[in-house]
Amino acid sequence: MPPKNDLDQQGSLRAHAYHRHAPNLNQELVKQGWCWWYRKYAPGDTVLEGLENIAREDRSGLWADPQPVPPCVRIDVVRVFPKSGGER
């Protein structure tokens, strides 16, 4: 189990991710628009703020959607499948 201070209020692990091809994977994901800068856990992080602003302006990743929904907002999605052996 990770140290308690590395967990958020829901018990999820907070971490910095690194990869040999991306010095800081968190920054790379924000830069490409694949995740949000979570201000609650990285307040005042001007690097993430700048990268997210660039991704928004470029409409990269999730910012291509005209109304992206923050991950803190729960959306119930109902999938409808054909009754006759259709793919799932």
Image (cartoon, rainbow, N blue to C red):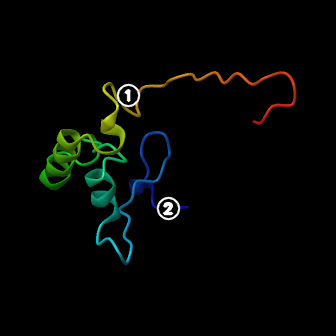
Q: Amino acid at mark 1?
A: Val
The amino acid at mark 2 is Pro
Asked if residue 11 is positioned above or below residue 28 in the image, the reply reads above
Circles 1 and 2, Cβ within 8 Å, touching? The answer is no
* Quadrant of the image containing the C terminus: top right
Percent x, y for residue 51?
19, 51
Q: Nearer the viewer, residue 16 or 48?
A: 48
Q: Earlier in the sequence, mark 1 or mark 2?
A: 2
- Residue at 40% x, 54% y is 14
The answer to whether residue 57 is left or right of residue 7 is left
Give the percent coordinates (x, y) of residue 58: 21, 43
Q: Can you give x and y, in whole percent of width and height, for residue 83 in the image? A: 84, 21
Specify the label residue 2 is tagged with.
2
The N terminus, quarter of image: bottom right
Left or right, 72 with respect to 46, comes to right
Tell me what residue is drawn at x 42 percent, y 26 percent.
73
Residue 8: which numbered mark, if any? Answer: none
Marks 1/2: CA distance?
A: 29 Å
Count residues near mark 2 (Cα–Cα under 10 Å), then give few for <14, some for 14-19, many for 20+: few
Q: How many badges with numbers are in the image?
A: 2
In the figure, residue 86 lies in which quadrant?
A: top right
What residue do we see at 17% from left, 43% from top? 53
Give the side of residue 2 with respect to residue 39, left or right: right
Residue 57 versus residue 21 in the image, above or below: above
Instruction: Using the image, determine if residue 30 lies above or below residue 62.
Output: below
The residue indicated by pointer 1 is: 69
Q: Quadrant of residue 79?
A: top right
**Which of the two discs, 1 and 2, sits closer to the camera?**
1
* Residue 48 higher or lower than 86, as above or below: below
Q: Secondary structure at mark 2?
A: loop
